[in-house]
């Protein structure tokens, strides 16, 4: 029932915010989702020894329609952003055309989509004890006016997370701000997928904007 539930919430958000893009609606649902269950404990994965669920099990968490109506910040993406992603995936011209289905411009290919989550997939051919991956993101203030957000990081095990800047200042609604997030994974002796999160906390306000982080080390040969 996850698909019809989330589709219904998306329809409600589109009715409330007809100017929002599909990416904005997705962002609002993801960044306001709750990783805590109705007993105020972390959501568990019932399929594997009932351990604490990871983003690979549950995504961003349990959708919260009321909070999604007023997410504070959104990670938006344009059609060209998706074209840039497809162009970076090394498809043939025929495959790219079959996906995009119109004329397209591949002058700026990029796999770093403005997505409200961060997944670090490290190349097993990298012969280093410290692996680094950097992400660039743009967030849009959809609150009622000026706002300031500070970052809170829950780092994955064996990783160092750096966010720059650590504070985002918005002077008006619909203003955009950019930030970078760098993940440094310190070791990969054991193939263990770790996870954490980044949350933008509004100063003197109600909004918290949370995104999951997943770190996948190179699989041992």
Image (cartoon, grey):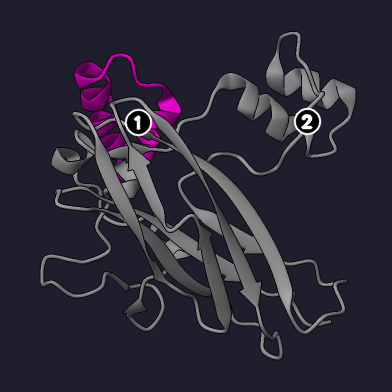
Residue 1 shows in this picture: no
- Of 210 and 141, nearer the camera is 141
Give the residue at x 41% y 65%.
Answer: 197
How far from the left and from the top, in percent, is residue 77? 52, 29
Say above or below: 73 vs 183.
above
* Mark 2 or mark 1: whose residue is earlier in sequence: 1
Q: Secondary structure at mark 1?
A: helix
Say above or below: 92 vs 182.
above
Is disc 2 surrounded by few (<14), some (14 to 19) or many (20+) residues within 10 Å?
Answer: many
How far from the left and from the top, in percent, is residue 189? 71, 91
Can you identify the residue that label 1 sits on?
25
- Of 161 and 76, nearer the camera is 161
From the image, give the main secondary structure of the stretch colored magenta: helix
User: What residue range appears in magenta?
Assistant: 1-28
Task: Indicate the quadrant containing the N terminus: top left, top right, bottom left or bottom right.
Answer: top left
- Residue closest to the far left: 39
Give the residue at x 79% y 24%.
Answer: 96
Say above or below: 205 vs 191.
above
Marks 2 and 1, how far apart at CA = 24 Å
Can you identify the residue that label 2 sits on?
87
Left or right: where 186 falls relative to 207 = right
> Magenta includes 71?
no
Disc ID at residue 100? none
Say above or below: 107 vs 114.
above
**Quarter of the image where one finds residue 22:** top left
- Of 50 and 216, nearer the camera is 216
Q: Secondary structure at mark 2?
A: helix
> Magenta includes 23?
yes
**Quarter of the image where one finds residue 192:** bottom right
Left or right: where 152 falls relative to 137 = left
Is disc 1 surrounded by few (<14), some (14 to 19) or many (20+) residues within 10 Å?
Answer: many
Left or right: where 37 falls relative to 164 = left
């Amino acid at each position: 029932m996850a698909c019809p539930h989330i589709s219904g919430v998306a329809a409600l958000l589109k009715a409330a915010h007809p100017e929002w893009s599909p990416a904005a609606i997705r962002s609002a649902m993801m960044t306001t989702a709750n990783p805590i269950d109705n007993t105020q404990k972390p959501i568990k994965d019932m399929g594997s020894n009932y351990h604490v669920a990871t983003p690979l099990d549950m995504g961003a968490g349990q959708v919260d329609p009321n909070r999604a109506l007023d997410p504070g910040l959104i990670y938006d993406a344009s059609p060209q952003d998706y074209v840039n992603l497809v162009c970076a995936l090394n498809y043939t011209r025929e495959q790219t055309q079959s996906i995009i289905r119109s004329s397209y411009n591949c002058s700026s290919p990029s796999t770093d989509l403005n997505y409200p989550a961060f997944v670090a997939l490290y190349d097993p051919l990298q012969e280093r004890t410290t692996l680094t991956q950097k992400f660039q993101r743009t967030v849009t203030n959809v609150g009622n006016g000026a706002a300031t957000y500070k970052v809170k990081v829950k780092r994955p095990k064996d990783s160092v997370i750096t966010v720059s800047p650590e504070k985002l200042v918005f002077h008006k609604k619909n203003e955009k701000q950019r930030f970078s997030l760098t993940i440094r994974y310190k070791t990969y002796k054991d193939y263990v997928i770790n996870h954490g999160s980044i949350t933008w906390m509004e100063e003197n306000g109600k909004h918290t904007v949370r995104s999951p982080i997943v770190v996948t080390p190179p699989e041992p040969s």
